[in-house]
Image (spheres, rainbow, N blue to C red):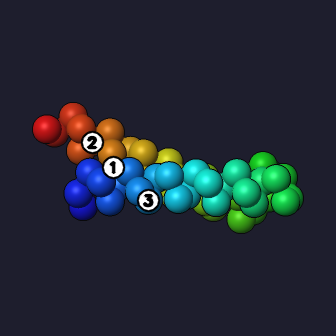
Amino acid sequence: MCEQKLLKDIEEHREKMIYLANLTSFSHPKVIDISAKLDELLNKYDSFIKAN
């Protein structure tokens, strides 16, 4: 996965998480799922940066 794709996915998940959290709460299961996916993406990006 290229750096630009990772950054785009990170931003999309971040925005979606904030949007849903504002509609529900930060402890809502859907928000938690998106947060977990965002964590995965951030870890992938961190690994990508460290490898280059």
- Residue situated furthest bottom in the rendering: 30
| Residue 52 at least partly seen | yes
- Residue situated furthest top in the rendering: 50
Q: Is residue 2 left or right of residue 28?
A: left
Q: Is residue 8 left or right of residue 24?
A: left
* Marked residue nearer the N-terminal end (3 or 1): 3
* Marked residue nearer the N-terminal end (2 or 3): 3
Instruction: State the residue position of label 3.
Output: 9
Instruction: State the residue position of label 2.
Output: 47
Report the amino acid beneath label 3.
Asp
Report the amino acid beneath label 1.
Lys
| Residue 36 at least partly seen | no
- As measured in the structure, the alpha-carbon distance from the residue carrying label 3 to the one carrying label 1 is 11 Å
- As measured in the structure, the alpha-carbon distance from the residue carrying label 2 to the one carrying label 1 is 5 Å
- Mark 2 vs 1: CB contact within 8 A: yes
The structure residue drawn at horizontal position 86% and vertical position 59%, both measured from the top left corner, is: 24
- Residue situated furthest left in the rendering: 52
Instruction: Count neighbours of disc 1 (C-alpha within 10 A) and say few if under 14, some if 14 to 19, many if 20 or more.
Output: some
Q: Is residue 47 left or right of residue 13?
A: left
Residue 2: % across, % down = 23, 57
Residue 38: % across, % down = 52, 52
Residue 6: % across, % down = 35, 55
- Mark 3 vs 1: CB contact within 8 A: no
Report the amino acid beneath label 2.
Ser
Quarter that holds the N terminus: bottom left
Instruction: Count neighbours of disc 3 (C-alpha within 10 A) and say few if under 14, some if 14 to 19, many if 20 or more.
Output: some
**Residue 51: quarter of image:** top left
Q: Which mark is residue 44?
A: 1
Quarter that holds the C terminus: top left
18 or 36, which is in the foreground? Answer: 18
